[in-house]
Amino acid sequence: DTGVSQDPRHKITKRGQNVTFRCDPISEHNRLYWYRQTLGQGPEFLTYFQNEAQLEKSRLLSDRFSAERPKGSFSTLEIQRTEQGDSAMYLCASSLRGGNNEQFFGPGTRLTVL
Amino acid sequence: AQTVTQSQPEMSVQEAETVTLSCTYDTSESDYYLFWYKQPPSRQMILVIRQEAYKQQNATENRFSVNFQKAAKSFSLKISDSQLGDAAMYFCAYRSAWANQAGTALIFGKGTTLSVSS
């Protein structure tokens, strides 16, 4: 399977704990995006990378969130001191550079904060 | 800031019939892309169809077609000969054509849940 993969698919944690998600993009894609989707809503942009450079962060990305993409390959999204409001589906997408290029989405990581 | 509005939270259609999902957007840009994405239950989002704003011709992909009205900022999706597998949540999305800082992010509407009955 050469699509976008995400790990884990589900994560249940207690409030205040740290969690880390991983995204493996399609291998030749140099752009990688993180989105957050809450129940009944469309995905909302969090941040994106071009190769290893993080070029944009949404206002939704509080100081408790950090994302990395070392060596321009896989990416990690860490949430520190989780809050119940962080419960959502976290989606990763990748694309080639260029405005018309399709973003391919992964299956998402569903986070539940108790 | 650009916004995307889908005013139909739920729609239903019978197999083999045609259904149209509505989408409007707001932007001050003249060059952009519009997309319809499909998200089946518990499955990942896939692209259904895309439209470049500079193209006057409406995009079509097999049973899926769009009605793009640039002046009205409207972008509806028509599904012909509906199939049970079309049941999903459909999202309309906007993306700026300019490679500025936020230009590559997709801006999504809230989605329309489509159910298909036999």
Image: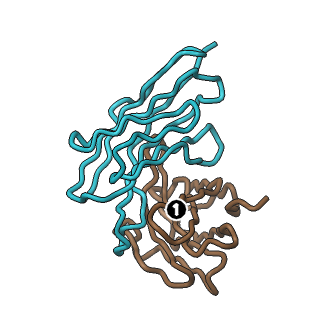
Q: Colour of chain B?
A: cyan
* Residue under the image location 62 percent in, 37 percent down: B41
Residue at the spot 40% in from the left edge and 75% down from the top edge: A56
Say which amino acid is labelled 1: Asn
Q: How is the image coloured?
A: by chain
Q: Camera-side residue: B50 or A62?
A: B50
**Residue at the extreme right:** A1
Residue A99: where, in percent of width, then height? Answer: 44, 65
Element at label 1: loop
Question: Quadrant location of the N terminus of chain B?
Answer: bottom left
A20 lies above or below B14: below
The answer to whether residue B40 is above or below residue A45 is above
**Residue A79 in the image: x percent, y percent?**
53, 71
- Residue A9 quadrant: bottom right
Instruction: Report the residue that reaches farthest toward the bottom.
Output: A71
Q: Is residue B93 left or right of residue A34?
A: left
Position in image of residue A77 (x %, y %): 57, 72
Q: Nearer the viewer, residue A114 or B46?
A: B46
Protein chain holding label 1? A
Quarter-of-image position of residue A41: top left
x and y percentages locating residue B21 in the rendered image: 41, 30
> Residue at 70% across / 63% down in the picture?
A7
A104 or A88, which lies in front?
A104
Tell me the brown chain. A
Please name the residue shown 34% across and 57% down the image.
B32
- Residue B56, above or below B83: below
